Image: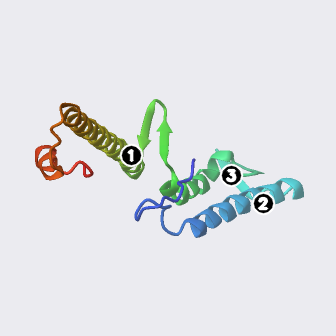
Amino acid sequence: MASGSSGGKAGTGPAPFRWPRWLAALLLTGGALGIYAFWLFTGAHPVCQVTTTGSTVTKTCGLPDVADFGYVLAVVVVLLLPDAKSIKVGGLEFVRLTNAVREQAAELDHLSQQVSQVVHTTSNISVTFAAARLAGVIAEGEASGQARPATDLTDEFGDVGSP
């Protein structure tokens, strides 16, 4: 299972009580493996079955089966589930909604920056064209000997310095 990463926005960080849950899962797993290893190396046989066939009673003892540790595995999964980004079971994949929302927010931020850049570039182009047009009118007036006052040009072209 993959763990979540802490984001910069509220509500996008790791699930609450992350470290205590991971510590509990680690201790539970380590404890179960430790007990099993102890039983294996000491020769203890804590699991016994008694079978009765007619008047014969048979007692067989041994180590717990791997399936007996299914409960431990289930508890560990429940402890680590809040940190899972996605879960795949067979061909089905379940993705956490918070991850999808986080991805959409990042995409929106990126698009917003692109739109802002396009608006800024368009504004710069408009100012450049207005300044070029104004320069052309001034040059035309000087060439014909009919210079116009600056206030007339400002009225005609607007404030050239602002977008």
**Residue 93 screen position, x and y as percent:** 44, 37
Q: Is residue 150 left or right of residue 41?
A: left
Name the secondary structure under disc 3. Answer: strand
Q: Answer above or below: position of 2 versus 10.
A: above
Residue that numbered label 3 is attached to: 49
How many numbered circles does the render carry? 3
Which one is nearer the viewer's eye here, 158 or 55? 158
Mark 1 or mark 3: name the one nearer the start of the chain: 3
In terms of depth relative to the viewer, which is nearer, 39 or 58? 39
Q: Residue at x 48, y 37 (%)?
A: 89
Q: Earlier in the sequence, mark 2 or mark 1?
A: 2
**Residue 13, image x and y in percent?**
48, 61
- Find the residue positioned furthest to the right: 42
96 w.r.t. 25: above or below: above
Disc 1 is placed on an element classified as helix
Q: How is the image coloured?
A: rainbow
Drawn side of residue 89 relative to residue 31, left or right: left
Q: Which residue is mark 2?
A: 34
Give the residue pinned by disc 1.
100
Q: Residues within 10 Å of mark 1 (few under 14, many from 20)?
A: few
Three-letter amino acid code at the position of disc 3: Gln
Residue density around tag 2, few if under 14, some if 14–19, many if 20 or more, within 10 Å: few
Q: Nearer the viewer, residue 130 or 42?
A: 130
Identified by mark 1, the residue type is Ala
Q: Name the spot of residue 157 as percent of width and height, x first.
A: 15, 44
Q: Label 2 is placed on what type of residue?
A: Gly
Separation (CA) of disc 2 from disc 1: 39 Å
Q: From the viewer's side, name the closer residue of 85 and 59.
A: 85
In the rendered structure, find residue 90 and report the number of the disc placed on it.
Answer: none
Q: Tell me, yes or no, whether the two marked residues, 3 and 2, touch with CB atoms within 8 Å.
A: no
- Name the element at disc 2: helix
User: Which mark is nearer the camera, 1 or 3?
Assistant: 1
